[in-house]
């Protein structure tokens, strides 16, 4: 009798364990559309990445993911909206790591903490800015460009997508390292700045490979340096800034997926898992590699490390360069 009771007892325990495991194994399933906040207007790389993720992630989740473009204030408007969204798993965002990091120093009173108020999901992608000039510019290298300007006592003008973004910071770093007379000309987007380089209104700009590659290939721009640690496979003849004589010149534009702090762990895990599936598809990886974009999905912990490192790096350059928010 005692043996039978023991068997029944352990059978009940086993069945309960199986039932609980089944509940735990169930994936989070959203019951309404989700929102993916993008910190820039449609047409840029962040928007491209968001739309690349939204459709297949939405299909996997069984709900539409609405891409919500909230440009302005270098990404502050969008990140403020994300932080104050209900932390229920239905809202997440894709900040530019460079702009997000720069704002931590540039904006004295941010409406959020750049690290503590965001739940990291996964790193998404990165691309190196390329230094481009007009094809008629006689300079054949970065050092040649700087030397000619110094010899002529000419101020070099460089454009950017706006104060604090990666191409602005790269330009400021070049000014610091070269000790050349350079002036920053901010634009509302990289496209407008590139137009002015191509028309000769400004001397140069750093802009992501993915944005400038078609214009380099068509001969409308000439690339003379890239701010990565190694040369780009799509621009193998363009030397790195370190090869050009500027040690430790390493600036990348990158993006990550984050959610509001307090997002349920099961929702965060599911969002990350579906994003990683998309970013790991060989055909997608190959297609965007041809444009200079590198996908690099990561653990949440690794994304947090990157966020902290970027804030520190950008703070150093911003303070040394004396950059002020507009």
Image (cartoon, helix red, strand yellow):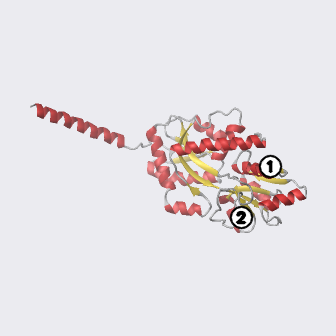
Labels 1 and 2: the sequence-earlier one: 1
- Check disc 1 and report the residue beneath it: 184
Q: Quadrant of the N terminus?
A: top left
Q: Determine whether 266 is above or below 129 in the image.
A: above
Question: Residue drawn 63% across and 46% down?
Answer: 97
Circle 2 — which element?
helix
Q: Quadrant of the C terminus?
A: top right
Q: Determine whether 140 is above or below 201 in the image.
A: below
Report the Cα–Cα distance between label 1 and label 2. Answer: 22 Å
Residue 164 image position (x, y, % from top left): 72, 45
Find the residue positioned furthest to the left. 1
Tell me where residue 72 sits by quadrant: top right
Tell me where residue 304 sits by quadrant: top right
Residue 299 image position (x, y, % from top left): 50, 46
Question: Residue drawn 58% across and 53% down?
Answer: 125
Q: Residues within 10 Å of mark 1 (few under 14, many from 20)?
A: some
Circle 1 — which element?
strand
Left or right: 153, with 35 as reference point? right
Residue 311 image position (x, y, % from top left): 65, 41
Front: mark 1 or 2: 1
């Amino acid at each position: 009798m005692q043996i039978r009771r023991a068997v029944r007892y352990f059978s009940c325990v086993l069945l309960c364990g199986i039932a609980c495991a089944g509940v735990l194994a169930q994936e989070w399933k959203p019951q309404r559309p989700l929102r993916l906040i993008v910190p820039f207007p449609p047409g840029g790389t962040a928007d491209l990445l968001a739309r690349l993720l939204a459709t297949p992630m939405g299909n996997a989740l069984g709900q539409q993911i609405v891409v919500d473009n909230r440009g302005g204030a270098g990404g502050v408007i969008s990140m403020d909206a994300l932080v104050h969204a209900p932390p229920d798993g239905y809202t997440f965002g894709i900040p530019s790591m460079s702009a997000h990091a720069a704002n931590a120093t540039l904006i004295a009173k941010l409406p959020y903490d750049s690290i503590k108020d965001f739940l990291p999901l996964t790193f998404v992608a990165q691309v190196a800015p390329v230094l481009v000039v007009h094809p008629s510019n006689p300079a054949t290298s970065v050092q040649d460009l700087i030397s000619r300007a110094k010899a002529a006592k000419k101020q070099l003008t460089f454009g950017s997508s706006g104060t604090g973004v990666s191409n602005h910071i790269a330009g400021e770093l070049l000014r610091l390292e070269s000790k050349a007379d350079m002036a920053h000309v901010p634009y509302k987007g990289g496209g407008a700045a590139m137009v002015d380089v191509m028309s000769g209104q400004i001397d140069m700009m750093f802009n992501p490979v993915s944005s400038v590659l078609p214009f380099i290939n068509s001969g409308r721009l000439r690339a003379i340096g890239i701010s990565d640690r190694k040369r780009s496979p799509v621009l193998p003849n363009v030397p790195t800034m370190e090869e050009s004589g500027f040690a430790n010149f390493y600036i990348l534009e990158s993006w990550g997926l984050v959610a509001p702090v307090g997002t349920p762990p099961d929702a965060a895990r599911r969002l990350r898992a579906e994003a990683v599936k998309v970013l790991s598809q060989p055909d997608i990886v190959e297609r965007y590699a041809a444009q200079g974009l590198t996908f690099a999905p990561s653990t949440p912990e690794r994304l947090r490390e990157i966020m902290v490192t970027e804030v520190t790096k950008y703070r150093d350059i911003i303070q040394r360069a004396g950059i002020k928010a507009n």
